[in-house]
Image: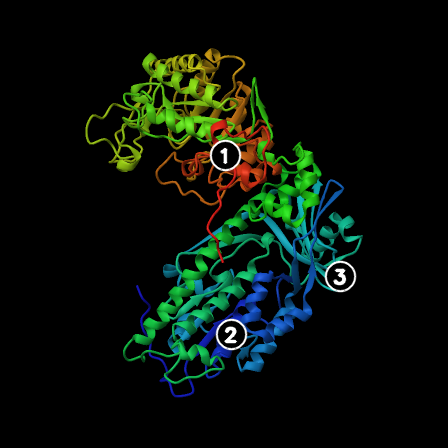
């Protein structure tokens, strides 16, 4: 519901807009300066509860992109900043006494207090009213007396709180504690350092911000913080303790604090950023973890975008109002198309605020995804410390997924080459084109065509479509091509179009496909994924209505517990009794025997995505009270029995993998500890690798989608257990594959949609990287196409 229009003081010529800014941080001050500069007749007031010199934190990092925007919007501020900036290129990663330096990164920083002084001076010069040590009136009161209220009041925003029903914030508190401190000397580089103490792993983030000072942030998991006794120390004691822990990095020098306190980072997300004539910017609207240095950057960029859209939409400006940007007036951008009496002014402002949010929201969402990946990396730091020093450094540098293997090769080719050498890459060979061995099978490269259901089989029999589909991708260069989930019984199908291996006719059809792949794409391995739909069966094909029951011809379903996938939509399955469990176990074994006769090179057991075996593993779908439910050991019992039955009949020299959902993305579902225990159990029973997927177990899941969003789960399993893993989930580029492998987060990378878009994805990845070695051979008939065709001339 729109905010009620409050009575406002009548406008007069020369007073085209009253603007209130709540919060005198960098974002609020910069917004005030820009809005006043764009129209000097505006009345702009900033309320700041603290004194001018009060600030939290010490240094601020600004990107060249942000500085470029400041330069274009206000050269006066830019020049003042430029004179203060400290610049450097290196990142030092210190781990277990070994310092690894990577160069070419390009940082610029200055003191936060100095940044505020520059913005204070600019605001004063432009005529902005600065009210320090003054609590702002309630946002609703300001909204009634001003044309615009800019809420820049930070992560603990009272404005956001007051209108939470409209902004609808989600605030997530994370698992690490951190404290902002300072050192009275400049570090030579951006420094990351680990300290492995008796209480757990601690992390230092440090960077210079002036000729004689550096920001120092100390961070650790909550349980480490408590075990170390920091919760019992005051500010001075905490500061001294941190200096002692990181004495080597500090050269024995002290740290200093300024109203520094241990806190847990909070990620703020709002469904809406404006309410009537009130708009959120900076941390009030969104936060991103400090480890990617984005807080001030985002706030400043918000201010710039807000000012731009208010100008371009002619908001808050009367007819005939002119500014020093007369060119904008000629475009009609500064013309107010109505007055308060008609409501057109309100509409114009609403359009401007909507445009501001539309521009900034995707940028912020992308930054928050990167920040979340970085934050989680540091939360899971203890799982990374056993990597060798250079691999640890590469892993740290690429943690947010914004810095990648290719990007690092441009920035610092010497460092990247050293990491490749450690990995075992022959000269001129990208990591993805190194071989990998699983039991008796050696894959020529690390690319897997992920299982993708096609839903075009007839009575479970794969036909010409499957031959062409799988054959094309085998010819396309991947090291391993996986079938779709092949069902072990008619009742185990998801849809009527699912392929099966419960009859000899089906086996003969699969043998035709494996024979083609082995003959025409020698060196490509073909794997079969065996599964049973469980409670997610008897539905329409994906394009006819995903997870929707068939209009007719439904078959009965079985599951761990009698819980429908969607209550009132999908049918309620029958809970498997002892006889039913034995029958399903034998169906898997019989399908595995046929798969061996078909000459598949690898077999994967599908224990993910809410299908039958996954349904036993998740506490959300297994409510049994017998030996096959309850504790995780009980929930594992049947999937492990099936695995053992399949492994017993599957040839000893051929590898067997298991696909798991490492999280259900739902409260009360599979925990991180559960996922490790499940992977550990399958590895102990002989699984050669774990294919780590997530979700699709319950319909009300809330996945955190994003590039490579599932790979942290693979990383955790690989490095906690020491079992090879297949990483999946929005891995879309060969650069992602190389990065994941070099960082030690995965051994193989499975890609689905990229292979639908381009069956020759792997060969094209080789061509784009200039690789012509044995791990990506072009079929003889295709060799003439191994170079990109010429394109038309582009100016």
User: Circle 3: is it few (<14), some (14-19), or many (20+) Cα within 10 Å?
Assistant: some
- Residue hosting label 3: 184
Q: How far is mark 1 from mark 3, CA to CA?
A: 63 Å
Q: Which of the two discs, 1 and 3, sits closer to the camera? A: 1
In the image, residue 510 sits, relative to residue 294, either above or below, namely: above
Instruction: Please give the name of the residue rendered at 31% of the width and 20% of the height, measured from the top-left corner.
Output: 461
In the image, residue 498 sits, relative to residue 356, either above or below, namely: above
In the image, residue 368 sits, relative to residue 683, either above or below, namely: below
In the image, residue 268 sits, relative to residue 754, either above or below, namely: below
Viewer can see residue 558 = yes
Instruction: Please say which color scheme the image uses.
Output: rainbow
Mark closer to the chain start, 2 or 3: 2
Give the image quarter of residue 553.
Answer: top left
The x and y percentages for residue 387 are 66, 36
The x and y percentages for residue 684 are 55, 20
Mark closer to the chain start, 1 or 3: 3
The x and y percentages for residue 67 are 59, 65
Q: How far is mark 2 from mark 1, CA to CA?
A: 58 Å
- Mark number displayed over residue 707: none
Q: Which of the two discs, 2 and 3, sits closer to the camera? A: 2
User: Circle 1: is it few (<14), some (14-19), or many (20+) Cα within 10 Å?
Assistant: few
The x and y percentages for residue 700 are 36, 40
- Residue hosting label 1: 784
Callout 2 touching callout 1 (CB < 8 Å): no
Q: Nearer the viewer, residue 176 or 415?
A: 415
Q: Which of the two discs, 2 and 1, sits closer to the camera? A: 1
Kind of element beneath mark 1: helix
Viewer can see residue 604 = no
Q: How far is mark 2 from mark 3, CA to CA?
A: 34 Å
């Amino acid at each position: 519901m729109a905010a009620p229009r409050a009575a406002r003081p009548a406008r007069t010529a020369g007073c085209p807009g009253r603007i209130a800014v709540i919060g005198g941080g960098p974002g609020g001050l910069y917004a005030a300066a820009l809005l006043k500069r764009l129209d000097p007749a505006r009345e702009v007031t900033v309320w700041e509860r603290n004194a001018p010199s009060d600030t939290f934190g010490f240094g601020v990092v600004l990107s060249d992109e942000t500085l470029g925007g400041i330069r274009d919007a206000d050269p006066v501020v830019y020049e003042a900043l430029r004179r203060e900036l400290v610049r450097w290129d290196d990142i030092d990663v210190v781990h277990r006494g070994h310092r690894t330096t990577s160069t070419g990164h390009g940082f610029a920083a200055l003191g936060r207090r100095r940044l505020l002084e520059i913005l204070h001076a600019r605001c004063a010069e432009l005529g902005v009213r600065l009210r320090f040590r003054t609590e702002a009136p309630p946002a609703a009161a300001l909204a009634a007396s001003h044309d615009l209220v800019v809420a820049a009041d930070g992560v603990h925003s009272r404005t956001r709180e007051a209108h939470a029903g409209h902004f609808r914030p989600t605030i997530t508190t994370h698992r690490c504690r951190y404290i902002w401190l300072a050192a009275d000397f400049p570090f030579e580089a951006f420094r990351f350092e680990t300290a492995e103490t008796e209480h757990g792993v601690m992390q230092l983030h440090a960077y210079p911000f002036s000729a004689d000072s550096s920001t120092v942030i100390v961070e650790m998991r909550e349980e480490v913080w408590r075990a170390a006794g920091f919760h019992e120390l005051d500010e001075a004691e905490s500061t001294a303790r941190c200096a002692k822990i990181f004495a080597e990095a500090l050269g024995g020098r002290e740290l200093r604090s300024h109203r520094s306190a241990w806190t847990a980072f909070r990620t703020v997300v709002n469904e809406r950023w404006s309410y009537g004539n009130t708009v959120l910017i900076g941390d009030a609207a969104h936060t991103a973890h400090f480890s990617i240095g984005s807080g001030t950057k985002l706030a400043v960029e918000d201010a710039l975008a807000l000012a731009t859209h208010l100008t371009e939409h002619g908001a808050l400006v009367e007819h005939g109002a002119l500014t020093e940007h007369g060119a904008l007036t000629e475009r009609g951008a500064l013309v107010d198309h109505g007055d308060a009496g008609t409501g057109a002014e309100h509409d114009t402002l609403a359009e401007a605020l909507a445009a501001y949010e539309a521009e900034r929201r995707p940028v912020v969402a992308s930054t928050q995804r990167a920040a979340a990946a970085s934050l989680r990396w540091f939360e899971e730091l203890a799982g990374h410390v056993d990597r060798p020093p250079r691999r640890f450094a590469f892993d740290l540098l690429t943690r947010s997924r914004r810095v990648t293997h290719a990007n690092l090769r441009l920035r610092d080719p010497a460092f990247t080459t050293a990491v490749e050498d450690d990995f075992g890459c022959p000269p001129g060979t990208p990591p993805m084109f190194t071989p990998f061995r699983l039991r008796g099978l050696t894959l020529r490269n690390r690319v897997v065509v992920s299982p993708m259901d096609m839903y075009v089989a007839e009575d479970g029999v794969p036909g010409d479509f499957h031959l062409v589909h799988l054959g094309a991708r085998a010819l396309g260069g991947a090291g391993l091509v996986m079938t779709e989930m092949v069902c072990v019984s008619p009742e185990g199908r998801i849809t009527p179009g699912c392929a099966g291996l419960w009859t000899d006719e089906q086996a003969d059809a699969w043998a035709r496909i494996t024979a083609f792949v082995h003959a025409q794409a020698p060196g490509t391995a073909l794997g079969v994924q065996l599964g049973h739909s469980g409670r997610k069966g008897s539905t329409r094909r994906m394009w006819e209505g995903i997870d929707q029951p068939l209009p007719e011809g439904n078959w009965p379903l079985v599951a761990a517990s009698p819980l429908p996938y969607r209550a009132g939509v999908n049918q309620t399955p029958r809970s498997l009794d002892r006889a039913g469990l034995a029958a399903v176990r034998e169906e898997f074994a019989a399908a595995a025997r046929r798969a061996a006769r078909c000459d598949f090179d690898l077999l994967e057991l599908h224990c993910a995505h809410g299908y039958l075996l996954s349904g036993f593993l998740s506490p959300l779908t297994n409510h049994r009270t017998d030996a096959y439910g309850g504790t995780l050991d009980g929930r594992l019992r049947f999937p492990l029995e099936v695995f053992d039955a399949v492994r017993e009949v599957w040839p000893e020299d051929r590898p067997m993998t298991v696909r798991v959902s490492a999280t259900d993305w739902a409260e009360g579902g599979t925990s991180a500890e559960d996922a490790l225990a499940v992977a550990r159990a399958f590895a102990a029973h002989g699984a050669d690798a774990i294919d780590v997927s997530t979700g699709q177990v319950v319909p009300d899941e809330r996945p955190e989608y994003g590039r490579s969003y599932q790979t942290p789960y693979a990383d955790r399993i690989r490095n906690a257990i020491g079992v090879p893993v297949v990483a999946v989930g929005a891995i879309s580029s060969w650069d992602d594959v190389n990065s994941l492998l070099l960082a030690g987060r995965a051994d193989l990378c499975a890609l689905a949609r990229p292979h639908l878009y381009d069956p020759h994805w792997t060969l094209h990845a080789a061509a784009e990287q200039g690789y012509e070695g044995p791990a990506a051979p072009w079929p003889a008939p295709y060799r003439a196409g191994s170079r990109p065709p010429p394109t038309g001339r582009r100016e």
